[in-house]
Image (cartoon, helix red, strand yellow):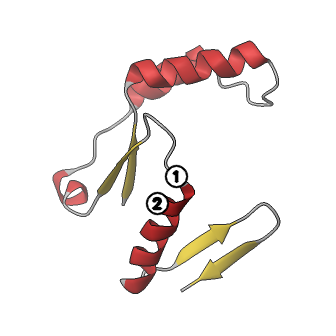
Amino acid sequence: ILAFEAPEAVLRARVAARAALAQDASEAGVAVLERQLATREPLAPEEQAEAITIGTERPLPWAAWRALLACLRRAGIRTRAVGAETETTET
């Protein structure tokens, strides 16, 4: 389980920045974020034991993502690499 987390203030700032640009096709504004925050459920203890938590307060460099994918593959976990032009399933 990959658990992505960011502080609420960061999430609100991202939604506000996206709205200010008025270039995003998504209609997920503050109301959607509020609903998601109100209805989110924490991972169960057995899920937490298996989870890798990734803080998303700031962008994660691509090298870090590649390293994470390599670790998952070495562990025998199938990953799907998605690029700008192709989508492939790798083992």
Q: Is residue 56 left or right of residue 27?
A: left
Residue displayed at 64% across by 18% down: 17
Residue displayed at 17% across by 53% down: 45
Q: Residue 86's spot in the image, x, y percent?
A: 79, 70
Amino acid type, residue under disc 2 in the picture: Ala
The span from disc 1 to disc 2 (Cα, nearest Å) is: 5 Å
Q: Residue 56's spot in the image, x, y percent?
A: 44, 40
Q: Who is closer to the viewer here, 85 or 39? A: 85
| Image height of 57 relative to 78, above or below | above
Residue displayed at 66% across by 25% down: 28
Q: Label 1 neighbourhood size at 10 Å, few (<14), some (14-19), many (20+)?
A: few
Q: Is residue 81 left or right of residue 10?
A: right
Amino acid type, residue under disc 1 in the picture: Pro
| Image height of 3 relative to 34, above or below | below
Residue 64's label in the rendered image is 2
Q: Is residue 49 left or right of residue 33?
A: left
Task: Please name the residue that numbered disc 1 is placed on.
Answer: 61
Q: Secondary structure at mark 1?
A: loop
Q: Who is closer to the viewer here, 47 or 54? A: 54
Residue 22's label in the rendered image is none
Residue displayed at 70% across by 77% down: 88
Does the CB distance between marks 1 and 2 fall below 8 Å? yes
Q: Residue 70's spot in the image, x, y percent?
A: 46, 76
Q: Residue 39's spot in the image, x, y percent?
A: 40, 29
Q: Secondary structure at mark 2?
A: helix
Any part of residue 8 in sight:
yes
Any part of residue 76 in sight:
no
